[in-house]
Image: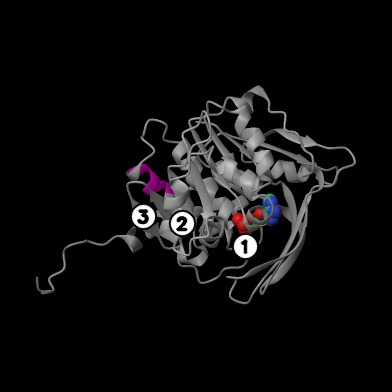
Amino acid sequence: MPITVVGSIAFDTVKTPFGERERMLGGAAVHFALAAAFCAEVHVVGPVGDDFGETELDVLRSRGVDVSDVERIDGGRTFFWAGEYGWDLNSRETLDTQLGVFEGFQPKLSDASRASDVLFLANIQPELQLDVRAQLPAARFVALDSMNLWIDIAREELARAIASVDCVILNDAELRQLTGKPNLVSAAREVLGWDAAEGTRGPSVIVAKQGEYGAALITREEFFALPAYPLETVIDPTGAGDTFAGGFVSYIAAHPEEETAGPLLRRAMAHATVLASFNVEEFGTERVQRLTGAEIRSRTDELGAMTRFEAGASELSLGA
Ligand code: AMP
């Protein structure tokens, strides 16, 4: 099933203990699309300024991503984000966020983008997420990501956007912040209990990203978790969350005949974990641009072998 994604298309300036890059291609929608394009048709929606060149668009085009709804705003500046990571890469400080062309942007989706069965509302102003959601009322699966900034300054709009989707993908700290609940499982349960927005089904799948510790999946029926793929060298975590979301959502989109429940969601978590692990090996989109299907398959097999165990086979005598 084709996927439409709206979210930031950006230039990122990033400093990690291993180096820095100025104004490299980034943005939540870009990282998402590059990951999702391995197994789904992807349409990207969003504005760029006249500082955004054909070279950047070609990165997306070369993976078959449809960029006809990437709108160039004359005289505008592309979204800009700058961040710096601490020595173990677990903490990140945002140094600058400039919305640029995203301020006041009114998305006009083409027929092709409106026809997608799957919609991903990547990280951007919740108002814009709501606008695009309203343009795909019949989408079969809708997922959303966000971040602390929007919880801080646009909580009400974000809560409305969440009530209109099937799946919420957030960092664990953001889930806690959003709900005010210190416990992750109760925070997820709280969001699962939110009333659905009119004409929608309301959230039924919560994915809590936990950085280098992996990710957890919580639905009304089950809990599942995977560790991150253990890498010895991590260079830049920027975009790992969006790459994870691209892997997760595209895996679901690639299996239209299967119910969006247990077995499919677990395999989607593994695919997402593997894609995110490649993203962090180099700066920005560098590694994923060169990634091959064979590399994805082989790392998925390794992750499977690493996380498999035989429950209940213990020979210990544990008493009654
Ligand atoms: P992640 O590392 O997965 O959280 O995503 C990092 C990406 O999100 C970067 O490429 C940024 O351009 C983008 N980003 C950072 N802050 C924001 C924001 N406030 N709204 C939308 N996108 C953002």
Predominant secondary structure, magenta span: helix
Q: Is residue 241 magenta?
A: no
Residue furthest toward the bottom?
Answer: 87
Left or right, 97 with reference to 139? right
Badge 3 amino acid:
Phe
Q: Label 2, on which residue? A: 187
Viewer-side label of 1, 2: 2
Q: Secondary structure at mark 1?
A: loop
Considering only vertical position in the picture, is 50 above or below 228?
Answer: above
Scheme by which the image is coloured: one colour
Residue extent of the magenta highlight: 263-268
Mark count: 3
Q: Closest to the observer: 193 or 305?
A: 193
Badge 1 amino acid:
Glu
Q: Secondary structure at mark 3?
A: strand
Indicate the quadrant containing the C terminus: top left, top right, bottom left or bottom right.
bottom left
